[in-house]
C-alpha cells in the first residue's frame, strides 16, 4: 500500500452528491456536499474535484472509488457500488462507535437500521415510496411558510406547547394545509413544531418495524435532515432516548463508502 493512495466515497442522492476522501490510514482529509440538480454526472464530477482540491491533490492522484446512493451506477470509475444501508452502517460505526440503531433521513427516503455490537447490519426498514418527512418534504414546507430551510430548527425552539397538528403528510396536501394555516394567522413556529412532530411520528413507526424498544439503544441520526435539530428533538422525544448526531450528518454514507473502498483495495 502506497502512503499517497487515497480512497473516495461518493454518495449520490436526490438532493445532494456527498463525497468523502480518506487517506491510507482511513483518516478523513476532505469532504464536499454538492447539490445534485438535474445533472448528476456534473454533481459527481464537481464533488470529486472539490475534495481533491481541498486535499491538495491533482486530478491524476491515485484514488480508489466506491459509490453509493440511488445514483451509484452513474459513477463510472468506481471500484464497486455498495448499498446505502451498508455504507451508512460503516460510516456511523467509524464516527460514533457503539451505535446500535441508526435513523437516516435524506432527500427522498427514510431508513431505520438496526446494528449489532460490532456495527454490522441486523435488520433495516425503508420508506422510499413517498417523500413525506424527508428533505424534499421539508423544502416544500419551508417554501410554503416563506422561510429558509436552515431556519426550521431555530423556529422549532420558539414553538409553544400546543395542539396544532397536520391532517396529512402527503407533500402536496400538507403544503396546501400549511398555506391555509399561514393565511388563517397561525404562528410559523407553531406550524414548524407541528411539522416536526408529524415527521417524528412517521419515523417512530418506521423504527418500530426493526426495533420495538429503543430505551436501551445507542441511537444516532444521519442524513441532511439531521441538521434540523427540531426534527432530532421530536424523534428523540417519541422514541424516549437521546439521539447522537455526528458533525457532518449528510456525509455518513460517503464516509462509509470511502472506508469500504480502502478495505476492498486491501489497505
Image: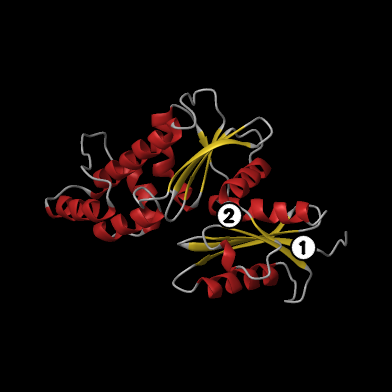
Residue 108 occupies which quadrant of the picture? bottom left
Few, some or many residues within 10 Å of mark 1 (<14, 14–19, 20+): many
Vertical placement of residue 226 versus 30, above or below:
above
Q: Is residue 267 visible?
A: no
Q: Residue at x 78, y 72 (%)?
A: 61
Element assignment for label 2:
helix
Element assignment for label 1:
strand
Residue 65 relative to residue 254: left or right: right
Percent across and percent down for residue 5 are 81, 63
Vertical placement of residue 251 versus 235, above or below:
below
The quadrant of the image that shows the C terminus is bottom right
Q: Looking at the image, which is closer to me, 208 or 140?
A: 208
The quadrant of the image that shows the N terminus is bottom right
State yes or no: discs 1 and 2 in contact (Cβ < 8 Å): no
Residue 149 occupies which quadrant of the picture? bottom left
Vertical placement of residue 83 versus 116, above or below:
below
Q: Is residue 37 visible?
A: yes
Percent across and percent down for residue 201 are 34, 36
Q: Which residue is mark 1?
A: 6
Q: How far apart are labels 1 and 2 at the CA level?
A: 17 Å
Q: Earlier in the sequence, mark 1 or mark 2?
A: 1
Q: Residue at x 52, y 38 (%)?
A: 124
Q: Looking at the image, which is closer to me, 166 or 88?
A: 88
Q: Which residue is mark 2?
A: 251
Vertical placement of residue 64 versus 42, above or below:
above
Residue 232 relative to residue 72: left or right: left
Q: Which mark is residue 207?
A: none
Residue 180 relative to residue 136: left or right: left
Q: Residue at x 55, y 57 (%)?
A: 69
Percent across and percent down for residue 225 are 44, 50
Amino acid at each position: 500500500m502506497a502512503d499517497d493512495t487515497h480512497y473516495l466515497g461518493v454518495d449520490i442522492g436526490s438532493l445532494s452528491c456527498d463525497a468523502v476522501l480518506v487517506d491510507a490510514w482511513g483518516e478523513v482529509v476532505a469532504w464536499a456536499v454538492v447539490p445534485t440538480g438535474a445533472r448528476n454526472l456534473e454533481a459527481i464530477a464537481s464533488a470529486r474535484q472539490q475534495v481533491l482540491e481541498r486535499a491538495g491533490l491533482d486530478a491524476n492522484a491515485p484514488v480508489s472509488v466506491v459509490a453509493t446512493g440511488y445514483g451509484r451506477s452513474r459513477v463510472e470509475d468506481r471500484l464497486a457500488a455498495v448499498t446505502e444501508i451498508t455504507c451508512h452502517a460503516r460510516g456511523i460505526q467509524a464516527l460514533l462507535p457503539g451505535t446500535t440503531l441508526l435513523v437516516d433521513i435524506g432527500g427522498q427516503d427514510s431508513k431505520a437500521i438496526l446494528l449489532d455490537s460490532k456495527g454490522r447490519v441486523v435488520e433495516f426498514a425503508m420508506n422510499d415510496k413517498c417523500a413525506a418527512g424527508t428533505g424534499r418534504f421539508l423544502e416544500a414546507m419551508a417554501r410554503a411558510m416563506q422561510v429558509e430551510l436552515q431556519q426550521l430548527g431555530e423556529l422549532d425552539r420558539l414553538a409553544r406547547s400546543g395542539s396544532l397538528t397536520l391532517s396529512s403528510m402527503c407533500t402536496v396536501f400538507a403544503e396546501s394545509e400549511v398555506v391555509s394555516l399561514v393565511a388563517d394567522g397561525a404562528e410559523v413556529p407553531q406550524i414548524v413544531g407541528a411539522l416536526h412532530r408529524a415527521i417524528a411520528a412517521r419515523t417512530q413507526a418506521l423504527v418500530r418495524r426493526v426495533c420495538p424498544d429503543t430505551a436501551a439503544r445507542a441511537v444516532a441520526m444521519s442524513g441532511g435532515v439531521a441538521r434540523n435539530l427540531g426534527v432530532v428533538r421530536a424523534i428523540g422525544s417519541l422514541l424516549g432516548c437521546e439521539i447522537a448526531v455526528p458533525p457532518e450528518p449528510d456525509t455518513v454514507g460517503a464516509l462509509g463508502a470511502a472506508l469500504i473502498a480502502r478495505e476492498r483495495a486491501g489497505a
